Image: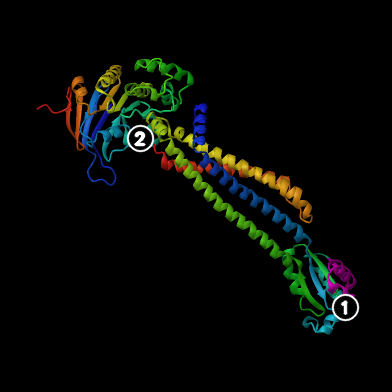
Amino acid sequence: MIRFDNVSKTYPRQNAPALHDVSLEIERGEFVFLVGSSGSGKSTFLRLILREERASTGTVHVLGKDLARLSNWKVPQVRRQLGTVFQDFRLLPNKTVGENVAFALEVIGKSRGQIRKTVPEVLDLVGLGGKDDRMPGELSGGEQQRVAIARAFVNRPMLLIADEPTGNLDPQTSVGIMKLLDRINRTGTTVVMATHDAQIVDQMRKRVIELERGRLVRDQVRGVYGYQH
Amino acid sequence: MRAHFVLSEIGVGLRRNVTMTLAVIVSVALSLALLGGSLLARKQVNSMENYWYDRVEVSIFLCNANDAETGDPACARGAVTEEQKEQIDAELQEYDLVDNVYFETAEEAFEHYQEQQADSPIAAVVTPDQMQESFRVKLTDPTRYEVISSAFAGRDGVQSVRDQRSTLEPLFNLLNGVNYAALGLMALMLVVALLLIVNTVRVSAFSRRRETGIMRLVGASSFYIQMPFILEATIAGMLGALLACVLLVGVKQFAIDTFLADEIQVIDFVGWDAVLSVLPWVLVVGALMPSIAAFFALRKYLKV
């Protein structure tokens, strides 16, 4: 699903690499936590998967494709098979909940009939059934993140990338979001989630990858957030 | 491609940037009106050149008794004789270049002079014997005036050889110069319009970076992402081009047809066919130029 082979990334005009010689493999259907302090390289790791950045050395394979060899005009085809969720939700404030989800389908050219059928389905799935016509501003943070997850999942992606999806939410709401992500994972979608939330990582007991100053320092199958002393 | 979606995006973009869009429309309109105007002016000057150059003659002025007495150096050997006149006439007939020859007598010259200078006090004191006889030579190719000039100037009995074309040339040079100035102005306006378009597209892309960011994430093709911006620029350009067309038609209708054509009847002004033939060019340039400018601007500001 995802394979990093000796991947390093150095941004222009910076001496220290953001990612240094990282090799790992994530299998289909896995749920992976990506942990590490700010500036440890988590975001760079995710940006490389999304092909927002290219690796300086080494190769990144996503869904069997070598991203370095992928030409620019083919990138959208790969991104359609990925879903992305962010800490700040990234919803369009002037569109309703239903329109926000539909937007993801419209811009890849899906037919109107298909959109009308799929959008309520996926909103039901994330627990927002019947809230199609609400504006994002009227919803709570947890509900907004559910809309974002619905938008990310509406194409039934093979892989869901979540960059601190609970970063702006209170613990109780976070649990709800994690349950939802777990449910999505059970449908066969691989989930890679960067987080700072120790409680969540400790509860879920999933694979944990830890980065520190750009290096891979830990890869545990059923890990917890911090080192156990 | 969902037309409805793209159209609504364009509408939003144009409304959000009303002032910039208006600036684009006006600058495109002005530069294209100048483009159309100078194309038409060129046609006008060309047709005037053809018209007037077809009518110009080379005049061979002959010495009269008066010239010989007043000591004109060209006429030092006295007034022209009948033999010399016959000789010149015969030689002129031999040139292929010569279309026809008309001999103007002193009497005729006097009449023309009196007609043209009726108001002048000099006309009252001029007498027929002061006027010169002349050959009025019409050439098949008016540009080859030197052939006649070199053959007859300086000959006994010939006072001077004058080409009417040389009196018209400064006028046409001036008109052509004005035309080039208009083209230069158009080029500058076009540059201004292009810079405005690039800036407008940049502002537009920046104000919608949230939407375009999401579009990129969910895998919209860059064509789909860029389309609304390019069409926005195209629509603004087309509106500018239409405005330019209205300006050109307006100038033709009101300034030329109802005003100048009555005031200056000697000039045959450009017709509607010429105006209509210029309009498609104005529209094509108005639609293509902004789209291409927007395309290149977006390559910089909307990366995949």
Q: Would you call the spot at circle 1 few (<14 residues within 10 Å), some (14-19), or many (20 or more)?
A: few
Asked if residue A186 is among those painted magenta in the image, a careful observer would answer no
Relative to A63, does residue B269 appear above or below in the rendering?
below
What secondary structure is the magenta-colored segment mainly? helix
Q: Are marks 1 and 2 in contact (CB under 8 Å)?
A: no
Look at the numbered disc 2 and give the secondary structure of its residue.
loop
* Quarter of the rendering containing residue B152: bottom right
- Count numbered badges in the picture: 2
In the image, which residues are magenta?
A: B101-128
Mark 1 falls within which chain? Answer: B
* Quarter of the rendering containing residue B117: bottom right
Indicate left or right for A109 with A16 as reference.
right
Which residue: 83% across, 81% down? B67
Give residue B47's mark. Answer: none
Please tell me which residue lies in front, A158 or A127.
Answer: A127
Residue B30 is situated, as x and y percent measured from the top left of the image, at 60, 48
Mark 2 falls within which chain? Answer: A
Relative to B208, does residue B49 appear above or below in the rendering?
below
Residue placed under numbered mark 1 in the picture: B83
Q: Tell me the quarter of the image containing the C terminus of chain A.
A: top left
Please tell me which residue lies in front, A226 or A48.
Answer: A226
Indicate left or right for B221 with A191 as reference.
right
Q: What distance separates the C-alpha of mark 1 from that of mark 2?
A: 95 Å
The three-letter amino acid code for the residue at tag 1 is Glu
Residue placed under numbered mark 2 in the picture: A70
Asked if residue B119 is among those painted magenta in the image, a careful observer would answer yes
Q: Tell me the quarter of the image containing the N terminus of chain A.
A: top left
Residue A99 is situated, as x and y percent measured from the top left of the image, at 44, 23
Which residue: 34% across, 27% down? A89
Residue B302 is situated, as x and y percent measured from the top left of the image, at 41, 38
